[in-house]
Image: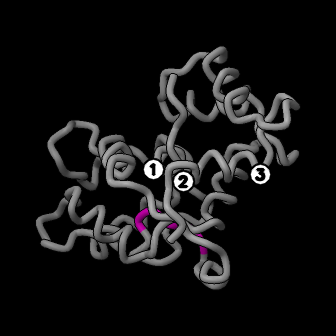
Amino acid sequence: MSKPSFLELQYNLSKKKFLSKPSRLLSFGNGQNDSLLPSYQPNQAEMKKVFDKFDSNRDGKISREEYKAMLRALGKENMIRELSKIFRAADLNGDGYIDFKEFLEVHKKEGGVKTMDIQRAFRDFDSDGDGKISAEEVFELLKRIGEKCSLGDCRKMVRAVDANGDGVIDMDEFITMMTRTMKLG
């Protein structure tokens, strides 16, 4: 199993304050201190992988129903009420869908992936709040969103990222993993 990109994890995890601003399709902070921390620019191939996760019927566009289904899978039913704001901000051509070009444009406007976003994603993985991500936590989260991944695969993923050999992923290891293929922006 390949290492998930940050954007795949961002898709997989969402955040508790998902879309605090209507134009923040992939960014999840309140924006107040985000400019103080570095941001990273994901490559287009990673963006396409995330887009394809949302576009479940593979028609090249994200419908409101597909977006709702993703929010439900992530346990974010309370964010469904934000759907109109999301689509007003992202559906630039007004056709009722978010195509890949629009998806890229919204993300580009937001200035990339913020360090704070990565830290929030870490906390979503760290379900017991102990400051470490175990293979079991990865497995449970991926299972909840419908990803097919065995516990053994999750253990391999953790081992691949675990730089200090303690059997879990800490915040520094997580940030390193998530930004490995991105450019500092």
Q: Position of residue 96 (x, y in %)?
A: 17, 63
Q: Which of marks 3 and 1 is nearer the N terminus?
A: 1
Give the secondary structure at mark 2: loop
Q: What amino acid is at disc 1?
A: Leu
Task: State the mark number for residue 152.
Answer: none
Q: Do the residues labelled 2 and 3 touch (CB within 8 Å)?
A: no
Query: Residue shown at 36%/64% (left/top)?
Result: 83
Circle 2 Cα neighbour tier, 10 Å, few/some/many (<14 / 14–19 / ≥20): many
Quarter where residue 162 is shown: top right
Decide: is 124 above or below 167: below
Measured from the top left, where is residue 104 in percent x and y?
30, 63
Image vertical order of residue 180 relative to residue 104, above or below: above
CA distance for labels 3 and 1: 25 Å
Name the residue located 49 percent from the left edge and 61 percent from the top edge.
183
Mark with earlier residue (2, 3): 2
Residue underneath mark 1 = 71
**Residue pointed to by mark 2:** 14
Residue of label 3: 171
Amino acid type at image mark 2? Ser
Q: What stretch is highlighted in magenta?
A: 25-29
Q: Is mark 1 on a helix, strand or loop?
A: helix
Q: Earlier in the sequence, mark 1 or mark 2?
A: 2
Q: Is residue 26 magenta?
A: yes
Q: Quadrant of residue 30?
A: bottom right
